[in-house]
Amino acid sequence: MSTAQPIAIDRAPQAHPSPMHFFQTIHAYQSTAALLAAIELDVFTHLAARGTATAAELASDCKASPRGIRVLCDYLVISGLLMKSAGSPDWSTHNYSNTPDSQLFLDARSPASLAGSVSFLGHADMKPIVDQLVTAVRRGGTGREGQGSVEDENPAWVDFARTMVPILMPAADRIPELLEVGKAGPVRILDVAAGHGMFGIRCAQAYPQAHITALDWKNVLEVAKENAAKFGVSDRYATIAGSAFDVEWGGPYDVVLLTNFLHHFDTPTNEALLRKSRAALKPNGRVVILEFVPNDDRVTPPATASFAMIMLRDTPGGDAYTFHELSAMMTKTGFKDVQITSLEPHPESVLVARA
Amino acid sequence: MSTAQPIAIDRAPQAHPSPMHFFQTIHAYQSTAALLAAIELDVFTHLAARGTATAAELASDCKASPRGIRVLCDYLVISGLLMKSAGSPDWSTHNYSNTPDSQLFLDARSPASLAGSVSFLGHADMKPIVDQLVTAVRRGGTGREGQGSVEDENPAWVDFARTMVPILMPAADRIPELLEVGKAGPVRILDVAAGHGMFGIRCAQAYPQAHITALDWKNVLEVAKENAAKFGVSDRYATIAGSAFDVEWGGPYDVVLLTNFLHHFDTPTNEALLRKSRAALKPNGRVVILEFVPNDDRVTPPATASFAMIMLRDTPGGDAYTFHELSAMMTKTGFKDVQITSLEPHPESVLVARA
């Protein structure tokens, strides 16, 4: 064995073990896809001609949707291939421009243009991924059939429930402390779109008088029930099988959990979910929302903001919503006292509001 | 227009315009493919069991080739997912180990294992790319048919010649100064596998008495001849059509250029090319080699060292050779006074040696 010092190339120094580097590497192919899609849509060339452009202006040039261009261009800012000016929470006012390198090398009219080299460098097998993204940018929503990843009974969610617990556990571990229901005696908690169930199960473990009701499709609930048994809370664990949009939620509850759910849907759909949540809560009951919440600039923090691209690709109307947008949805549907807590280094935040 | 400061997320601060960030983003999908391939080959789990392992030991565990495992694991070190100890230029002695995060999250036996989540997170369309890489790691060379990218008359090289000039120009601009043949009067230069021809053409422009002979497949030479005309050196530009391995090279020459050529082949093939180069040179004539030359650790500089993965994937025996390996090939074939010059920030180096 060599006595040389081990070589470790750190991307981002970190104090605690974190699955974030794994998570980012799994998604790294998206930066290649975004670059190839932007070249195919002539984003860099149109930006070079305009100097700066809003998403709507650029969408008009590129024959795409403003929403699709906004998500693609924000991702390119995160990837260091574009710049943006974001003076207001309203994304329709944000201005995009080329970086000096993109202006020189990616404007198809530039003598130094590298746009042609993608036919040599762009791996042929990336084409289906790039095509899918180009379609999503043009449409402003998934290029997949029907509702994409949120299609009814999509078996991917059983996969999700079975395999994603280690990634989400750092977030699940933080939910009970944010509820502070320890002295409240018996509390009833509804876990909407429970998946693996760990968000509700952690609450049951933290509060011995808490009773959990998990709501999800029947096939997914099997995983939640297995986890409830594994963590010893089955005696305080009920289930409601079906779509959160269609079934009765019962109640009234002290707490409704909406974890990793709102990002799949557009604003009107989320407002309907929030109204249904409020109707199922006791007076002063609380809704707890776990989400990827980027800053108003929509490009920071990078790991949080880049999630918008997955929603553009996989859903008809989902997004990584800002705090501004989420609190507007909650206020409009009658919630008050909206609080947000970042779960750093986990890329998500928790919002809590009162009915 | 907003008055806010533009937001530019810099990956690597740089003094001059550079296509490197474009180049790295085009290849970013490879880090996703490498991670997924390593999970499929159980690299992290076997490393967790052994603590540290050489490429040969790990290859035995993973039922793969030592060479394939070496290239994959070096790439994973560059990607921040493994560590290595490299005390000697001989890669067979290098030891790999998990990072703390990989040990915790990617050992399939770990309770925190995320290996299962790739079925949810790993984009289904990445499968052909991952399959191709897994095959290459098992074989120790391309999973593609025949000779892969270096198959005779592969039309990809016409694409290369037509589109890659802007990426290679910073390197081509540096070749004439390294030759110092300005006062030598008439010099004859052979440009082997000339491609776009710009390496020879830049020499012709710098030295008005230089005469260039470009050698490549016939379809590729058409591009080189167009460029010779475009840059005004057609009157001092001859061509030899065919494979560098099969045709007579003529001569004797003052200089033989082997630019971006050796990395496609194994060591015996390169030694044959170097012998043929020496036989075509005048006494004291020089061979000029442009290559991706990583340090002996094979993981630095990252943009240089990661090129080995493309050669594993696309060729039967190509590599990113170290200076140690290249100078051994040159010494063995009779060259002397081997000099190396880095072309930073361009990721390649130039080696010059005397016949």
Image (cartoon, coloured by chain):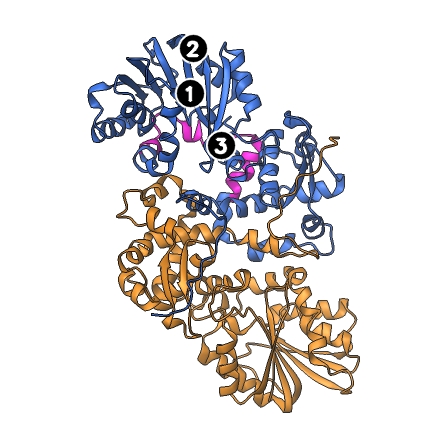
Chain colours: A blue, B orange
Q: Quadrant of residue B290?
A: bottom right
Q: Which of pointers 2 and 3 lies earlier in the amino acid sequence?
A: 2
Closest to the camera, between mark 2 and mark 3, is: 2
Q: Which residue is mark 3?
A: A311
Reading the chain from its start, which is encountered first: label 3 or label 1?
Answer: 1
* Protein chain holding label 2: A
Residue under disc 2 on the same chain as residue under disc 3 = yes
Q: Looking at the image, which residue is at 37% across and 18% down?
A: A244
Decide: few, some or many residues near mark 2? Use Cα within 10 Å; few <14, some 14-19, many ≥20.
many
Between B90 and B336, the one nearer to me in the picture: B90
Label 3 chain ID: A
Q: Secondary structure at mark 1?
A: strand
Amino acid type of the residue tagged 2 in the rendering: Arg
Q: Establish if A340 lies above or below B355.
A: above
Residue B20 in magenta?
A: no
As drawn, the residue found furthest toward the bottom would be: B283
Q: CA distance from mark 3 to mark 1?
A: 21 Å
Which type of secondary structure does the marked residue at label 3 adopt? helix
Q: Is residue B68 above or below residue A194?
A: below
